[in-house]
Structure formats: structure tokens, C-alpha cells
Amino acid sequence: MPLMTSKPMFDLAYDGGFAIGAFNVNNMELAQAIVEACAKESSPCILQISKGARKYANIRFLKAIIDAAVEEYPNLPICVHCDHGDTVELIKTCISDGYTSVMIDGSHHPFEENIHLTAEAVKVAHAAGVVVEAELGMLGGIEEDVVGLDAAEYEKNVEKFLTDPQQAAEFCKRTGLDSLAVAIGTSHGAYKFKHEAKLAFGRIEEIMKTCPGIPLVMHGSSSVPQEFIDLVNKYGGAMPNAKGVPEDQISMAVRKYGVCKVNIDTDLRLAMTAKIREVFATKPAEFDPRNYLGPAREAIVGMVRRKLHVLNSAGKAETVIAHWKKLGSPMPTYYTRKKAG
Ligand code: G3H
Ligand code: 13P
Ligand code: ZN
């Protein structure tokens, strides 16, 4: 059962010219679509669960769905990850829920506080065989709200919010983290740029140099494809000026600059919403949820498959499993204890 931490995945992605897609799961259709797409493309995948997802779906239901996915696809390397965990308490709960990876996001705290929080999370997680992602720097979108900036102001001053390469080196050393989420011009949500969409590739390069061996993570990496925005707007939505990170820039960050994990949520929401809107608009008499959630699920499968090619992870499942086995098939203690009874 290749449920694993992200370590075997990142080991290979680090200099393999590919990245692992981390897709947000909020309900059954999303989970099913993501794993179906990854199975069709033989790609490793990270299923990530936010605090909001835990609350919306009830983690017991979500966990049962993910367990079913793991059983249904025994040849798929799957990592179950906590997205934007904000307290050590939440990290402990996620570990006891069977997550194999956690993110502790202290990026909105002052540097020393972020180090302290992250180091504490690392201590707890590593003792349970779980890996830790932490963040340094500030993304736009949700995070700029934390410090009371508006999107235009963030974009104008973006340089000063990007991850500092020297600080990053100190952060990695003093916390013992396993992967680092960096601010390099991306932001959460569907409105990422008011002006030109441009990632700070030079910054990725510098961080790679000051933090050798540390897998880098890009949050806020949806591309917000125009054709989906057009569909949403055509069928009664209102998403003017939505803009994401162009897929060629994501692909460059991965293939040329070595980013190992790419977080995508907004694009799945868009695919789902566009399809549901289309069914409602073109078949106003439809009221069987299977007849709009089914096509929505198909649309998500298509979106995820498209992303796996952008990330160049299609076809990499087998090598990841082989590497995981070579490492001795490591599992968090939650699973080894369960197996031992
Ligand atoms: O980075 C945030 C993810 O898109 C999760 O969003 O907190 O609304 O579930 P959420
Ligand atoms: P998007 O909003 O760009 O999909 O980013 C999702 C994300 O970073 C989840 O942690
Ligand atoms: Zn994020």
C-alpha cells in the first residue's frame, strides 16, 4: 500500500525535472477525480487537506474517502498532507489522523517566532515519522490580508515580501524542516496579478543555492485557464479579471529551477464550478446531483491530468514506488503501530 511521506517523491523530483502536484481535497468528487487522474497518468500525488476542508467535510468522512482511494489504487504513490497548519495542536491531531506529511505555516509571524513554532512542529512530527513543510516569506491573496495589504499594494512591493535567501538558509538549519514553501511571486486564489504575471525565477535560483538539498514548494500555483473563466462567465458567473500563473512559468520553475511541490486548488474549483454552471444553464430541469456532480468530477479529472503534464510527473509513479521500497518502505508510526496491532 504505497501511502507514504513526500520524502521518496521529493528525493527523485529534486533533480529529476519534475514536481509533485499537491491537490486540495474537500469532498468525495475531488478526491476521486484527483486519484483517477493520477492513476491514468501513472503519477505520484499529494492529497492535501486544509483546516477549512477538515471543518467542511468532517475529517472522519474525508479520511475514509482517502483510505478508500488508497485501497482502490494500490500502485499509486499517495501522500496525505495537512495544508497550512497553523498550530502544533493541529499538527498533532493530523498525525493522529494518519496524515503522512504536515505543513506548519508560521510565515505571518516574526522570524524568531516562525522558527520556534516550526522547530516545535518538526520535533513532534519527526518523532512520529511524519515530514514537515514550513513557509518563509509572504504570498499574495489570503496572506496579504493578514498584514492588511490590498492586492495592488502587494504587487507593487512584491520584492520585499519574497523569501530572503539568507534567512531561508538560517530557517532551514534552525528548524530541521523537510521542505520549504517559498514566496516567489505567486498568490492564492483566482486573482493573482493585476499587471504582468511574472515569477521571480532569480529568487528560486538563489534559494536553491543557500538551501542545498531542501525541496522547494510553490503555493498559489493555479493557472486560472482563461477557457474556464470564460465558461464560468458565459454561464452566469462573475469572475472578471481573474488571472493565474501561466503554465509555461510553472513548467519552467519545475523543469529548469527544480521546484519539487506545486500546490493547486483554485484550478480544481474552477473546473468543477464551470461544469456545474454549464449543466445548470443548459439543462435547467436537471435536479439529480449525479448529473451535475458527475460531469464536474470528469472536468476535474481533465484538469488534474493537464497539470500532471505541466509538472512533468506523468509516468513517474513506478520509479517513486521503487525508490520508496529501496528506502525500506518507510511509514509513519501511525501505520506501523496499526499493522503491529
Ligand atoms: O491555500 C489555501 C487552499 O486553497 C485551501 O483553501 O482554506 O479555503 O480550504 P481553504
Ligand atoms: P491556488 O489558490 O493557486 O490553487 O493555491 C492553492 C494552495 O496554495 C494551497 O495551499
Ligand atoms: Zn497554500
Image (cartoon, rainbow, N blue to C red):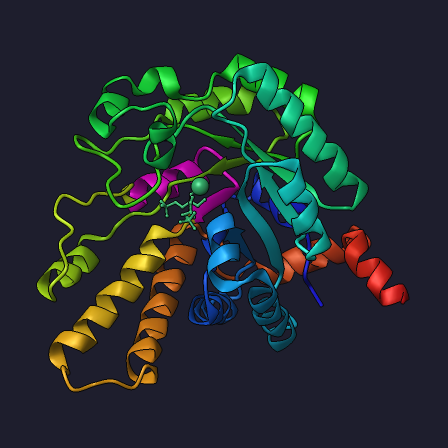
**Viewer-proximal residue among 243 and 283:** 283
Q: Which residues are magenta?
A: 247-263
Task: Give the image quadrant in which the ligand numbered 3 is located.
Answer: top left
Q: Is residue 286 magenta?
A: no
* Residue at x 61% of width, y 70% of height: 64
Tell which of 245 and 50 is nearer to you.
50
Residue under the point 19% across and 45% down: 242
Instruction: Tell me the residue at 38%/41% (across/down).
Output: 220
Query: Residue 4: which quarter of the image?
Result: bottom right
Say above or below: 188 vs 296: above
Left or right for 240, reference 37: left
Q: What percent of the width, then of the height, locates residue 106?
A: 54, 28
* Quadrant for the C terminus in the image: bottom right
Instruction: Name the residue: 57% across, 69% down.
Output: 61
Residue 166: image quadrant is top right
**Residue 255 visible at all:** no
The reply to whether residue 248 is visible in this rendering is: yes
| Farthest residue, direction right | 340
Q: Nearer the viewer, residue 122 or 19?
A: 122
Q: Position of residue 326 (x, y in %)?
A: 78, 54
Within the magenta stretch, is there residue 257?
yes
